[in-house]
Structure formats: C-alpha cells, structure tokens
Amino acid sequence: MSAMAAPHPLDNPGHASLNGPHAHFAERRGRVARYPVDVSPWFALPDDAGPGDWADLAALAGPGGELALAAVDPALPPGWEPTFRVDGVQMTGEAVRGAHDEEAVRLGPADVPEMLDLVARTRPGPFLTHTLELGTYLGVRRGGALVAMAGERLRPPGWTEISAVCTDPAHRGQGLARRLVDAVAAGIRDRGEIPCLHGSASNTGAIRLYEQMGFTLRRHTVFQGARAPAALPHEVRTRTATG
C-alpha cells in the first residue's frame, strides 16, 4: 500500500505558517494557534480538528471573542456564531519570476501610520499596527506621500503570500500595483520561495491582473469569521479544573 501524500502547505496556509516559518509569532493552546492580535487576525486549526481543538480555539479567542480563519472552511460546532464569510480564490505564481523596481522603497515602522491610512482608504484586507513584522513591505511615494504598497503575509513552507496590495485612488491606472507585486515576488524568489496570493472571488479586475502576470488559480476557497461561545466549552472547564 502506498503512503498517503502529505497535505499541501497551501491547503491550510495559516496552520502551515504558524507551524513553520512564522512559528515565532504563534500564541498556542494545544494544537491550535493564532497570531498576536496586533499582527494578524488569523487563527489556525489542524486539518483534523476535533471538539478539543475547538475548545482550545475558544480559549484562545476568549469568551465571545471573534476570530478569522484563512482559506479553510470547517463546519462550526454548536455555540459558535458565524460573523462573516467571503468566497475567495487562491492563486500560485510558479511561473512568476518578479522584477525589482528602483522606485519601490522598503517600508518600516516609521511608515506604519501612512500604511494604515492607505489601507483604511483602499481596504485591501487585514493590516494592523504590527502586520509589517510578517515580512517585506514595499511602497511607492509621490510628492513624499505613500500612494501604493504591497507586502508579505502568510508563509507556508516554501511559499510566501503577497498581500496588502493597494493604490491610492488618485494614482490608479499607472501600473503601480503590478510593479509592486512584481517587486515583492522578486524578493520572494531571491530566497528560493514561490509567491502566492489570495483574493476575493468577486474582485475580477484584480484576478485578471494577476493572471496576466502569470499567477494561476489553484483553488476556490473561503475566508470566514466566527464568534466563540460566551462561556468556556466543557472541555476547557474540565482541563482547567484538573490542571
């Protein structure tokens, strides 16, 4: 009998990241993990999550706490309340080589206020006060102001997700997003990894752009949020009481 194939790192990218290159960020309980609340909203469940794992997840989230699951679609147990659900796509860039860009500057902690302002105006997805720590973020400035950026988020082994791709509305149509994605991809390739990305299935313009750049659809997926039960599950209470 042949051995079962190992799961692909992108099948459960949050779990693969927090148990791989991003393990130093992980806040853990049992087999579940999360990023710090000021870094990323994503929580991670194992593929074969059972009642004990969901109980540990509830403990990490806190009573009534909200969490987000990246590119996985488990059935919520009783007591959990769905808060959002977004149909998405997962795309991979095996054929994307990237290209460094002289105008793209590396962004650092001093740039975070401008980055947060740009994200608030363009809504590319979650970006928090310490998201910058997940990887390299590049930006383009015009007249001293940050007008476009892109960077790295999840890092399943062998892969890096390109995220936070956004351009100020007044500077769209100049190819800045494409150039920044290419520049971030070049840095990913320089360290021997493959770029990937996620997006909303409804954002057909962005999907078309990524396809033109050489990204291909790997699978349709789901991003979802859930609210933990207001009271700790029985499994958590029992473990707490018995030590």
Image (cartoon, grey):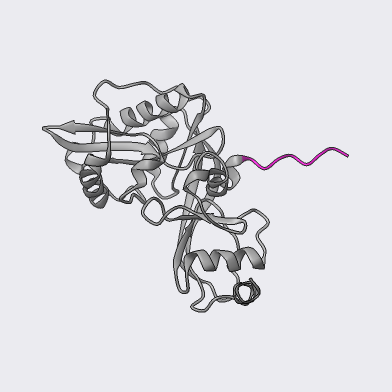
> Can the viewer see residue 203?
yes
Quadrant housing the C terminus: bottom right
- Name the residue furthest front: 243
Q: Nearer the viewer, residue 221 or 100?
A: 100
* Left or right placement of residue 78 versus residue 224 in this view: right
Q: Residue at x 56, y 53 (%)?
A: 72
Kindly tell me whether residue 44 is visible in this rendering: no
Task: Measuring from the top left, give residue 119's x and y in whole percent.
Answer: 27, 48
* Residue 36 vertical position relative to residue 170 in the rendered view, above or below: below
Using the image as rendered, state which of residue 38 and residue 158 is in the foreground: 38
**Residue 142: in magenta span:** no
Which residue is situated farthest in the left direction here? 143
**Res 13 → quadrant:** top right
In x, y percent, where is residue 206?
A: 37, 40
The relative height of residue 48 versus residue 92 in the rendered view (above or below) is: below
Task: Tell me where residue 108 appears, x and y as whole percent.
Answer: 27, 37
What residue is rendered at 63% in x and 54% in y? 46
Determine whether, in the image, residue 61 is placed left or right of residue 133: right
- Give the extent of the magenta segment: 1-8
